[in-house]
Image (cartoon, rainbow, N blue to C red):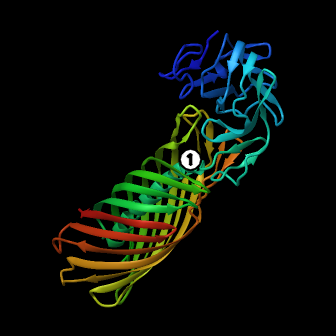
Amino acid sequence: MRLPLTFPPNLVPYGTYCTDCFTGNTLTINGSRNVVVGQEWIIRYPAVGGFSTYNFLLPYDIKNNQTILKVVGDADVTNATINIGIWGGNSFINLTSGEAVKLIDADNLVGTGKPGTFTASQGSTLKYDFTIYQDADILWAKLGGFSTGGTGGTGSTSGSVSVVEGTKTLSEGFLSGLVSTNLGGEISTGAAFQAIQAGGTGGVQSFGSVDAVHVRANTGSHVDVDGYSLVVGASYGLGLGESSKLTLGGFFEYGNHDYDTYNSFPGASLKGKGNSTYTGGGLMAGTKFTQDGGGFAHVELALRAGHIKTDFRSTQLQDLTGVNASYDSSSTYYGVVLGGGKTFAFTQYSELDVYGKLFYTRQNGDTVNLSTGEEIKFSAVSSKRARAGARYSHTLDNARRWTLYGGLAYEHEFDSKAKAKINGQHKIDSPDMKGGTGILEAGVRLKPKADGPFSLNLSVQGFSGKHQGVAGGIQAKLAF
């Protein structure tokens, strides 16, 4: 039989002569490591005392009236604090409301401890209400009552178990992956669509873009994302007659973003952080129809797919033993972007492009095990967005080497709710990015030589609304 008692460095054993044998001494009893003897998940000890805190880790499959600590002598709990945790994070406790277990069954129980109703934690995300009381020489813990609250972020209840406040931060960590891939899709398809609109026929052009971003996604609380994305690709233009062309191509995309999650609820707040990286690629196609009198119409389509990895950690979401909650997630993503618009030429130097875009991105779900023992099942999450905008461009010289542009757009997110469950049953509050965002952009396109193959685009974007922040990037294009 093992005696899994956890003693801190300053522990003074019971019965030793000392000035203060009480303050700071903690006894942690891990019942899951005990041997079952009849009704006892049993540790036998001749005498126990001198502790200011007793931590009892109950096995999840403990039964009514079973014993955790059997003391064949004196057990002194005078003025001691009693804490309870549930060991075995991926299953619910085997007790029902009103049933009780014996924390200490002693030949002689000394003192009264600090009786009352206490919250017992299971892992870092679940909690139970226990009433601790003394009857003769037995210290009992009775399961019963409900913890109050709403859902996930504020505590959800079902039976005698409830969800710890702030667990929404776990889902926000998973949702940060979708934020990253959405940002990546903006950059990848933006560079691809520019290549379609600007390219000629009968040749290959390569393009690339590197963008940095700082964005806050409001989810009911919020997630701050900082990082970079890059894309490289190539396209080929085909003539479809005198006034139209078809462009086909492909691209590779990569992004790396750090994120911080923030949750607040009555009387407290909770933070998490992590990193999301995605790697993928896509195909693109588009047509351009030149019109008499200047200007043109355009239609573009891009398909994306790839893999995303996300890690999460929080020093504020812990189990009874102080283990921080963390997880690693891995899933696939795919998306479609459809765009189109019409460019109106006012003069040979200025034009206005009025456009619209539809975005769809889906990140598949994943099941992870928290470092604190629970199983979290994340459902697949989808983003559906529509954007309408206009961009004005003005060329500064006859050789068309310098062009300034600026634009406004409005985007609406229709659906991006991230759903999750703990141990397959208890729902976590779902963060959601549904809502509108205004976008302001400005930039300059530079072509060092009027008839040269190389061009450069410097751009900056500002976001306000459901998404807030700024992004800036450099896009380069080389035609052969």
Which quadrant of the structure image shows residue 141?
top right
Looking at the image, which residue sits at the far left? 449
Question: 310 or 108: nearer the eye?
Answer: 108
The answer to which quarter of the image holds residue 59 is top right
Q: Position of 137 compared to 264: left or right? A: right
Residue 354 pos. (x, y %)? 44, 81
Q: Is residue 454 left or right of residue 226?
A: left
Q: Which residue is mark 1?
A: 170
Q: Is residue 102 above or below residue 214?
A: above
Instruction: Please name the residue shown 59% across and 50% down the image.
Output: 166
Instruction: Relative to 24, say whether 384 is above or below.
Output: below
121 vs 477, left or right, is: right
Q: Position of residue 214 (x, y in %)?
A: 39, 61
x and y percentages locating residue 229 in the rendered image: 36, 55
> Which of 383 and 156 lies nearest the eye of the viewer?
156
Element class at badge 1:
helix
The amino acid beneath tag 1 is: Leu
Quarter of the image with the C terminus is: bottom left
Tell me where residue 239 appears, x and y as whole percent: 35, 71
Q: Quadrant of the N terminus?
A: top right
Task: Give whichever of 240, 447 is nearer the camera.
Answer: 447
Q: Residue 185, located in which quarter of the rendered image?
A: bottom left
Crowd class of label 1 (few under 14; some 14 to 19; many from 20; radius 10 Å)? many
Q: Is residue 396 above or below residue 332?
A: below
Residue at (17, 69) in percent of width and height: 452
Q: Is residue 42 visible to the viewer in this orientation of the structure?
A: no
Residue ranking furthest to the front: 19
Left or right: residue 327 compared with residue 195: right
